[in-house]
Image (cartoon, helix red, strand yellow):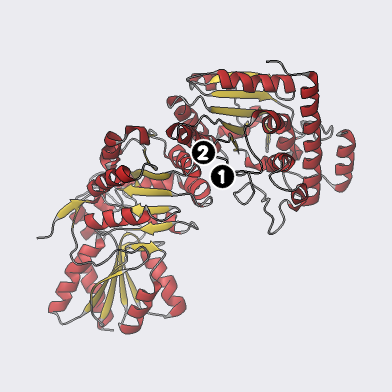
């Protein structure tokens, strides 16, 4: 049984770790520091933590001001508020200036669960993806959350890191983490499965089920959505019968859209999308919601079979 | 605070010169925002040529005071003040709004001396708060000046920032409100009433100073007073005349975002002598 971790626990602890060696790090939150776990940093470094209250627009533009003076700023709130509520501030004050602000948003996707639609960001990747200068990372588990944080702290410029609310199983043997370089988790030439975040674990189950049916699937952990690893995708398109893209996000504007755009221009390939198809979320347990929105391992498996049997 | 008559006269002359540059730049560009640039000219001239600690030849001097023009559409004024201070050669001013120019239609970081873009209203006070907090973390005593428009304070973000600057007791922040009474669609009072302006800022925990924004002595006095206020931020609410200095632009809402024709430029320059 794989280890289960909250990505946000790892986030809070990693912030403290980074804060110890880098006095230039500043952290901000909008009254959700207990949920996002930035509270751990606040406790350790109260001078370098700013709670901005329930005012995300002000928080983002204030982060820009801090970054304009050379600070490395980590800003956190729920994904829905970070990207939707404060989009103009993220675009104009952070990204247009190319400031060193890392937006680490938690509670993305339907796996938020009982809180329901208002708190389930299914559009956040889309909203961030269209902004020039913005980089996007969706770590698949706890350890990868730490890897991503350490990596982005070494690179200047804005970044959006998307985390979930629920505990996620640790994915073993992922290999080295490099921004913009996807990880091929299983080898296979029948079909490729490209997944990010929580969907990587679903996809792993699908791959092992497919294996028992004699189908060899290549599983790609696309932890960086932007910049996209084009080489790994083009290679998958060339060597398999098609690609299943899996994300806990709208099928419009997220990972699938980027994969589609790349392949339709450079190597037209059958792409099936596992994600939320223009619907709002709702209350429920994560597993119930994954079933309701057809984003389970079983759904991935079916899509992969459909590609193989074309 | 004593300022000699010569000092006042010198600043008034500089302001006149900047108004002339604004009119010429906008005439050349054939688009842009004269009204609010001219109404803020005296406020910004006093800052750049008397108040700000800055080194135009060393724009990233760590101890510099910061100026941020949150009402980015009035950047012709900002650009003219920067050029006249020596940040870049004056001839660059006449590339305003042209393809490839370092002087964009709304400010961004390609202009020496502009540290953060603006243009989407309501964000500058938040940016200034970030700068003020950075000063605190770095134990620096520089000050942050943020120019806002009156229509701009209809943005909700402004009041989020007002609350936060006050909460963090940033007495190194000095906001300046160019209260000329007009916005694109007409008078503030008709579009979206702002009054009581001073009481609103006071209620948010700010020290307020109300002045005639074209009286150089009052302007300098206000900046001095703002520096002496401790434990809370200050806002200078400056009553101004939109299009100040050019008779046919004064209080004419049509000149909010409309450049003068070549004939109007000539006429305006005659008045600005």
* In the displayed structure image, the side of residue B103 where residue B139 appears, left or right: left
Q: Position of residue B69 (x, y in %)?
A: 62, 38
Whole-percent x, y for residue A191 in the image: 27, 79
Q: Residue furthest top?
A: B1
Helix, strand or loop at disc 1? loop
Which label is found at residue B116?
1
Seen in the picture, residue B137 relative to A95 is either above or below; the reply is: above
Residue at 39% in and 46% down: A82
Total marks in image: 2
Residue beneath disc 2: B127
Decide: marks 2, 1 in contact (CB < 8 A)? yes
Among numbered discs 2 and 1, the one appearing first in the sequence: 1
The residue closer to the viewer here, A309 or A18, is A18
Question: Could you tell me which chain the residue with mark 1 belongs to?
Answer: B
* Identity of the residue drawn at 49% across and 40% down: A65
User: How crowded is the residue under tag 2: few (<14 C-alpha within 10 Å), some, or many (20+)?
Assistant: many
Look at the image and tell me whether residue B30 can be seen.
no
In screen coordinates, is A6 left or right of B52? left
């Amino acid at each position: 049984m794989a280890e289960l971790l909250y990505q946000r626990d790892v986030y809070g602890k990693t912030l403290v770790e980074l804060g110890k060696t880098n006095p230039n790090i500043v952290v901000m939150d909008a009254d959700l520091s207990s949920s996002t776990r930035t509270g751990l940093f606040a406790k350790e470094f109260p001078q370098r933590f700013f709670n901005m209250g329930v005012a995300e627009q002000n928080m983002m533009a204030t982060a820009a001001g801090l970054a304009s003076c050379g600070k490395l700023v980590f800003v956190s709130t729920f994904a829905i508020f970070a990207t939707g509520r404060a989009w103009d501030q993220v675009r104009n004050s952070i990204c247009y200036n190319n400031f060193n602000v890392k937006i680490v948003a938690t509670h993305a996707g339907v796996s938020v669960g009982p809180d329901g639609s208002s708190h389930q960001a299914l559009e956040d990747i889309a909203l961030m993806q269209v902004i020039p200068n913005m980089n996007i990372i969706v770590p698949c588990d706890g350890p990868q959350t730490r890897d991503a944080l350490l990596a982005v702290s070494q690179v200047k410029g804005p970044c959006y890191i998307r985390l979930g609310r629920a505990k996620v199983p640790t994915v073993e043997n992922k290999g080295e983490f490099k921004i913009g370089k996807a990880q091929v988790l299983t080898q296979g030439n029948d079909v490729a499965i490209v997944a990010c975040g929580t969907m990587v674990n679903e996809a792993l189950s699908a791959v092992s089920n497919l294996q028992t049916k004699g189908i060899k699937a290549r599983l790609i952990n696309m932890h960086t959505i932007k910049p996209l690893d084009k080489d790994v995708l083009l290679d998958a398109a060339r060597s398999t019968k098609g690609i299943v893209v899996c994300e806990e996000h709208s099928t419009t504007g997220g990972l699938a859209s980027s994969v589609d755009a790349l392949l339709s221009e450079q190597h037209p390939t059958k792409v099936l999308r596992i994600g939320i198809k223009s619907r709002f979320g709702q209350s429920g347990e994560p597993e119930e919601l994954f079933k309701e929105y057809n984003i389970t391992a079983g759904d991935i498996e079916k899509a992969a079979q459909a590609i193989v049997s074309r | 605070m004593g300022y000699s008559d010569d000092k006042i006269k010198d600043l008034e002359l500089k302001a006149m010169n900047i108004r002339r540059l604004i009119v010429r730049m906008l005439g050349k560009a054939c688009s842009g925002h004269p009204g609010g640039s001219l109404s803020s000219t005296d406020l910004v001239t006093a800052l750049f040529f008397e108040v700000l600690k800055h080194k135009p030849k060393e724009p990233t001097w760590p101890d510099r005071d910061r100026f941020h023009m949150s009402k980015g559409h009035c950047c012709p004024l900002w650009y003219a003040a920067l050029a006249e201070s020596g940040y870049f050669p004056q001839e660059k001013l006449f590339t305003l709004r042209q393809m490839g120019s370092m002087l964009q239609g709304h400010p961004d970081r390609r202009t020496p001396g502009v540290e953060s873009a603006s243009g989407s209203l309501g964000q500058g006070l938040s940016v200034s708060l970030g700068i003020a907090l950075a000063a605190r973390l770095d134990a620096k005593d520089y000050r942050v000046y943020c120019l806002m428009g009156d229509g701009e304070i209809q943005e909700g973000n402004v009041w989020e920032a007002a609350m936060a600057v006050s909460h963090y007791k940033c007495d190194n922040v000095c906001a300046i409100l160019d209260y000329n009474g007009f916005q694109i669609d007409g008078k503030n009072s008709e579009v979206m009433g702002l009054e009581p302006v001073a009481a609103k800022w006071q209620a948010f925990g700010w020290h307020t100073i109300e002045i005639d924004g074209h009286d150089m002595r009052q302007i300098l006095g206000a900046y001095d007073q703002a520096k002496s206020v401790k434990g809370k931020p200050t806002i200078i609410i400056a009553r101004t005349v939109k299009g100040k200095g050019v008779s046919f632009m004064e209080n004419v809402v049509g000149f909010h975002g409309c450049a003068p024709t070549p004939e109007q430029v000539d006429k305006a320059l005659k008045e600005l002598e």
